[in-house]
Image: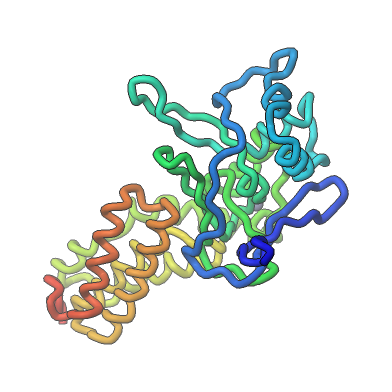
């Protein structure tokens, strides 16, 4: 059987010069593995434009088939660098960390056969995580990806206004982003900018669960409404994370209000979101995310055992 038949993605060329894009070859679930691969080349982060080009020297050492594939993937409408190799490395390289001398962690650029062909979107549906110990990059779906949909990742921080994202994408990668979030009508674009700024500062300005629990003056539904709103803003911006923290607070509130069914339902969703975000490397400490996933799981099995159960009922 053709091994490609089982892959959840296919790589396709959509124009003569615009390079390749990666598409879902079947439905992919949130958190599901798309690819796992070692880099085909690794370079120091800051490689100067020397003559002869060190970029070309690296490409000359690649396996000829691999080189043909990666050169064929390049978007030549953007080519402004001196050589194709430099263009690909500077625009398709992924920042990875390696353990250097004395165990010091040093940033490098990695070129990957699959992940380096995945294009950017400001509302991406996938994310990757680099593991310096296994020397592999794992690409996973951040949300459900329907068959035929393009698989996209973020090349830039997403909780910034459009103009800030465009600046990074233009200066570092040489393209103007034309994703759905960047091509909204003016009024919608202003609303989108405000939404992303609000999300970036969300936790600075929000009331904590402990504060809400201890303060009877706080309306019973205040915290639930606030977090449901944050989740709705994430949805409207097409952002799949961070959801787990919001879902967990909503679950806790329902638990504190003694609303058993709603508590179990929200805790189930929160546990699932922790699983996905941890697999995608979006939670900082994987261990802590796993603890929180397990704790949400315990609430679903025995809601009344939660320490805050019915404290504001
Ligand atoms: Zn964009």
Nearest to the observer: residue 178 or residue 207: 178
Please tell me which residue is depicted at 41% across the width and 52% down the height of the picture: 282
Residue 258 x %, y %: 19, 83
Please tell me which residue is depicted at 69% across the width and 60% down the height of the picture: 10
Residue 80 x %, y %: 79, 30
Residue 249 x %, y %: 29, 67
Residue 47 relative to residue 240: left or right: right
User: Is the residue 244 above or below the residue 167 in the image?
Assistant: below
**The quadrant where residue 21 appears:** bottom right
Residue 108 relative to residue 55: left or right: left
Quarter of the figure with the C terminus: bottom left
Considering every residue shown, the one lying at the far top of the view is 51
Judge whether residue 187 can be spotted in this image: no
Nearest to the observer: residue 72 or residue 275: 72
Residue 160 x %, y %: 53, 47
Residue 181 relative to residue 206: left or right: right
Considering every residue shown, the one lying at the far right of the view is 16
Please tell me which residue is depicted at 25% across the width and 78% down the height of the picture: 300
What colour scheme has been applied to the protein in the rendered image?
rainbow
């Amino acid at each position: 059987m053709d091994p490609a038949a089982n892959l959840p993605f296919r790589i396709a060329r959509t124009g003569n010069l615009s390079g390749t894009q990666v598409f879902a070859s079947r439905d992919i679930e949130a958190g599901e593995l798309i690819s796992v691969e070692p880099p085909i080349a690794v370079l120091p982060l800051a490689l100067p434009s020397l003559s002869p080009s060190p970029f070309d020297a690296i490409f000359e050492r690649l396996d000829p088939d691999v080189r043909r594939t990666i050169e064929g993937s390049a978007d030549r409408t953007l080519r402004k660098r001196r050589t194709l190799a430099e263009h690909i490395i500077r625009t398709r390289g992924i920042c990875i960390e390696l353990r250097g001398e004395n165990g010091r962690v040093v940033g490098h650029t990695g070129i990957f056969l699959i992940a380096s062909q995945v294009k950017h979107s400001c509302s991406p549906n996938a994310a990757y995580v680099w593991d310096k110990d296994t020397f592999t990059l794992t690409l996973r779906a951040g949300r459900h990806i329907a068959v035929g949909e393009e698989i996209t990742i973020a090349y830039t921080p997403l909780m910034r206004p459009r103009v800030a994202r465009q600046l990074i994408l233009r200066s570092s990668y040489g393209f103007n982003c034309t994703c759905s979030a960047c091509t909204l009508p003016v009024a919608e674009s202003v609303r989108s900018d405000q939404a992303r700024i609000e999300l970036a500062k969300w936790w600075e300005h929000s009331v904590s669960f402990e504060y809400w629990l201890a303060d009877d003056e706080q309306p019973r539904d205040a915290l639930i409404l606030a977090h449901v709103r944050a989740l709705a803003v994430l949805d409207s911006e097409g952002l799949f994370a961070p959801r787990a923290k919001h879902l967990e607070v909503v679950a806790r509130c329902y638990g504190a209000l003694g609303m058993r069914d709603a508590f179990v339902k929200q805790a189930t969703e929160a546990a699932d979101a922790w699983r996905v975000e941890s697999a995608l490397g979006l939670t900082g400490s994987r261990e802590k995310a796993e603890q929180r996933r397990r704790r949400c799981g315990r609430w679903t099995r025995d809601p009344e055992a939660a320490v805050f159960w019915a404290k504001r009922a």
